[in-house]
Image: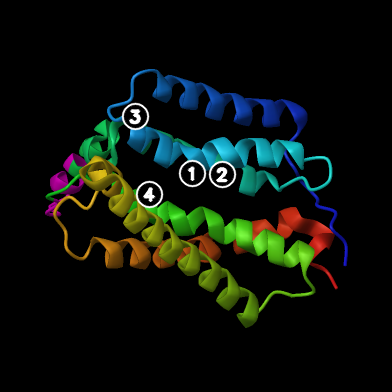
Amino acid sequence: MSTAIATPPGRLERRLQIAIVVVALVASGIAPADRLTWLLETIWVMVALPAVALNWRRFPLTRLLCWLLVAHALVLIHGGAYTYAQTPLGFRLRDAFTALGLEVTRNPWDRLGHLMQGFVPAILARELLLRLTPLRRGGWLVYLVLAACLSFSAFFELIEWWSALIYGADADAFLATQGDQWDTQWDMFLCLCGAALSLLLWSRLHDHELGRAVVG
């Protein structure tokens, strides 16, 4: 089983990706709306960025996955900077939905964040499974990718619960339930939808970028 990949991003492209994330992260941390929420939301970016960079020579990622990770990082950073209930882009998204005749009563950035929680990790899980295990394309690959995304979503909900127990009312901005008693269920459902959508949209391109890594 080969771990070579056909099209990782080039050096300049990687530097651009890193610069986008670092600049956004630094800017968001200057004066966030809630420092605790900013830290809890962006800690994933702070951990993932050096982890990818340190392992790049041994395990470079595909171009598709790298750009998806950048997009996910920006969603997390924006939510962390303003809190998910008060993101400016979320309010614009709500207004756009309203203009289309859809009744949206909350800032939907949290919903987008959980959709991305499946949309991006689905390709990450797919790449790791295809490159590091004997698993091939097919039903089991789809099932394991969806299961991985959904299990991480459930784990994240546990983190939110633990945060509420530890920090009490100080964790309200991080929880971002916005008064919805079914928020936890919506979060996991949207993660699952994001993962399924990502597999439908990107699997063919992802296979092309993986090249020989998915063959035999």
Label 2 environment density (alpha carbons within 10 Å; few <14, some 14–19, many ≥20): many
Q: What stretch is highlighted in magenta?
A: 95-104
Instruction: Name the spot of residue 32 as percent of width and height, x first.
Output: 33, 25
Where is residue 199 shown, x and y percent of the image? 54, 65
Question: Front-most of 49 and 211?
Answer: 49
Q: Distance between the residues labelled 4 and 3?
A: 19 Å
Sooner in the amino-acid sequence: mark 4 or mark 1:
1
185 left or right of 214?
left
Residue at label 1? 72
Closest to the observer, 179 or 59: 179
* Image coords of residue 5 (percent x, y): 81, 52
Which quadrant would residue 107 be assigned to in this image? top left
Q: Quadrant of the C terminus?
A: bottom right
CA distance separating discs 1 and 3: 20 Å
- The answer for how far apart the CA atoms under marks 4 and 2 are is 13 Å
Q: Can residue 75 be seen in this view?
A: no
Q: Mark 3 points at which residue?
A: 35
